[in-house]
Amino acid sequence: MTTPDNQGPATRIIHNRRHKDAFGSPYSPVYNTTTYRFENTADLLDVIEGRSNGNLYTRWGTNPSIQELEQGLARLENAEAALGFASGMAAISATLLAHGRSGIVCVGDLYGGTQELLKNHCRALGIPVTFLFREEQDRLAETLNEPGKLVYFETPANPNMAILDIRAIAETAHQNGALVAVDNTFASPINQKPLELGADLVLHSATKYLGGHSDLTAGALMTSASLAKPVVAWRKNLGQLIAPETAALLSRSLRTLPLRVRQHNENAMAVAQAMEQHPKITKVHYPGLPSFEGHELAKRQMTGFGGMLSIEVKGGQQAAEKVADSLNVFLLATSLGGVESLVSQPSATSHHGLSREERLKRGIGDGMLRLSVGLEDAEDLIADLNQALS
Ligand SMILES: *Cc1c(COP(=O)(O)O)cnc(C)c1O
């Protein structure tokens, strides 16, 4: 007999439920409740004092809709525990505060919001934060000069899809008494499972692929039960819990995640191959292309190459802007991971605050456009790019 432990991800997530519903509904209803009544004070004290696992108050995380979501999130990354948050940034900030207070060492490019959090807020709290370029990875051990630090990175990273070696970084970190957190938003748990490669904490902006329809804001942490515990306390007292309605909506999205990601992968590969042949494109950054710098590493640690890619348009910033403004099927918008395709120009959005020199140093060319390839018909996406490029 198959059990959730040996089933595939689609079966596991489609059959993710915690309760047998009295009316036969295959999934839990939305528990729009903030509180729970008790028969007597003794029962209430049992929960407050930790002798029983009952629900007390939703902000603490004890809500059936949220707990069902969290069981599903844990299943997707094969994690012992998962926590749902009101946003990706809520998941990241709670995790950094719970596990990064002795110091955080970042490797490679990071999401803009995470950079702000680290540079402005973590440093304001007195937390030492170090940034290493991807090319400076060999300095990782020396920056972990005292135990208890947290190594933090993203792979593939925004916007040039740079790949970092999760297993190698985790090994160095662990040898030096550090924990490892990976933002797995771009890959999704279907394409990459950092916990199985040695990471300790995996973070997601569930606003992206996990939600998948650009209609909800949420975040997730997948980790061990013991590392989750202190994060639960920060989440509770910072008030960062996901709402039950959003949790139920996200649970619904997760049931199609394996299917959606497979199609995102296929469409992005088709777009990447077409763009690689296009005379007006000087470079395509897509982990699935053999010409891509990180391709071999991506093949080793990913099971699919994702729906994100970036292209460099001949003629620089203005030419790229013209292409972005001429696309019809691709919508000009930030964010990623939804069913609809999106285009954005990193120099005008995520990396607008950097000087041209800094951008070039990070491998962000003047004519770069980032594409979040959606679930439309691939030939329509390619036709849209072709008409915009001409
Ligand atoms: C969007 C994003 C975040 C932040 O998530 P929110 O849900 O917007 O708070 C963090 N990391 C990455 C890689 C992202 O793309």
Image (cartoon, helix red, strand yellow):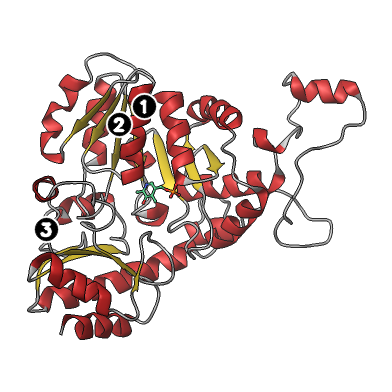
Distance CA(mark 3)–CA(mark 2): 24 Å
Label 3 is placed on what type of residue? Gly
Q: Is residue 256 above or below residue 274?
A: above
**Which of the two labelled residues, at mark 1 and mark 3, occupies the earlier sequence position?**
1
User: Residue at point 15% right, 53% down?
Assistant: 294
Q: Do the residues labelled 3 and 2 touch (CB within 8 Å)?
A: no
Q: Position of residue 265 (x, y in %)?
A: 32, 67
Question: Which residue has dot 2 on it?
Answer: 119
Q: Do the residues labelled 2 and 1 touch (CB within 8 Å)?
A: yes
Image side of residue 232 versus residue 21, left or right: left
Q: Residue 122 carries which label?
A: 1
Query: Which residue is situated farthest in the top direction here?
Result: 146
Instruction: In the rendered structure, find residue 85 and report the number of the disc placed on it.
Output: none
Helix, strand or loop at disc 3?
loop
Vertical relation: 173 (above or below) 35: above
Query: Which residue is pictured at 8% across the width and 47% down the height?
Result: 357
Q: Quadrant of the N terminus?
A: bottom right
Q: How many numbered marks, from 0 up?
A: 3
